[in-house]
Image: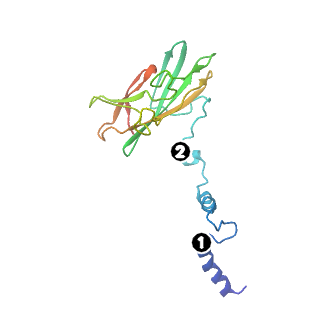
Amino acid sequence: MTMRNKLALLLVLPALASCGMLPGQDRQGTGGEEKQAAALQPTTTPEASGTPTPSPADSPAGELTAITSRKIKHDDNTLRIDITQLKRSGKIVTLTWTVTNLNTDGSWYVGANLGSDVLDFTTSAVSLIDPVNGKRYRVARNGAGADAACVCSRVNQHLKPGGGLEMYAVYGAPPADITKVNVEMADLGVFNDVPVS
């Protein structure tokens, strides 16, 4: 191949790539875009990029950095609650926390302990309280009807001894000048002055 032909090929390849005409690419648009997107994804691991890796549902939660933490007694169980984040993003805030079962034997049933009623196995009863404006923020819902699902964790499960479960709930954001709120966790108590990041 002459130098002239090589240069012509180098000029044509980018155009063919953008049209999806290179070997291995889907010409009908059924999957080629996904292959290209996958190829463009960064190859760094969460640890290398500084992004925390979520803990598995039944693994110890000690690896997570807590904003605030507390041990509590619930029925005959000893639990540790670690609030790990209360992050503002536009018009919403997302609360994440981990509950760890500190019992040496016997599992703790999350069930409806954080739900709005006895058959609500979610974290929908966890709310934010703005003490400055005297306002309570309830978990966001997907719709306005009575059956609208909360934008929060589903938690109908048992935590074995030493097991931790990361949970979340999403809310409308308090005003921008509110930098701390109280977090009310239904049966598990209240955390005061949790910073909003």
Any mark on residue 94, and which?
none
CB contact under 8 Å: marks 1 and 2 = no
What residue would you read off at disc 1? 19
- How busy is the neighbourhood of tag 2: few (under 14 within 10 Å), some, or many (20 plus)? few
At label 1, the amino acid type is Cys
- Relative placement, left or right, of 72 versus 127 is right
Between circles 1 and 2, the one closer to the viewer is: 1
In which quadrant will I find the C terminus?
top left
Q: Position of residue 26 (x, y in %)?
A: 66, 65
Q: In this figure, which colouring scheme has been used for the structure?
A: rainbow
At label 2, the amino acid type is Thr
**Which residue occupies the extreme top position in the image?**
76
Q: Residue at x 67, y 85 (%)?
A: 5
Q: Give the mark nearest the N terminus, 1 or 2.
A: 1
Gap in Å between the C-alphas at discs 1 and 2?
A: 34 Å
In the rendered view, tell whether residue 128 sits above or below residue 40. Answer: above
Secondary structure type for disc 1: loop
State how many labels appear.
Answer: 2
Q: Position of residue 159 (x, y in %)?
A: 60, 24
In which quadrant will I find the N terminus?
bottom right
**Which residue occupies the extreme left position in the image?**
133
In the rendered view, tell whether residue 88 sits above or below residue 60. Answer: below
Q: Position of residue 185 (x, y in %)?
A: 43, 24
Front residue of this view, candidates 148 and 60 = 148
Q: Residue at x 56, y 29 (%)?
A: 165
- Image quarter of residue 136: top left
- How busy is the neighbourhood of tag 1: few (under 14 within 10 Å), some, or many (20 plus)? few
Q: Position of residue 32 (x, y in %)?
A: 63, 63
What residue would you read off at disc 2? 51
In the rendered view, tell whether residue 35 sits above or below residue 94. Answer: below
Secondary structure type for disc 2: loop
In the rendered view, tell whether residue 12 sits above or below residue 23. Answer: below
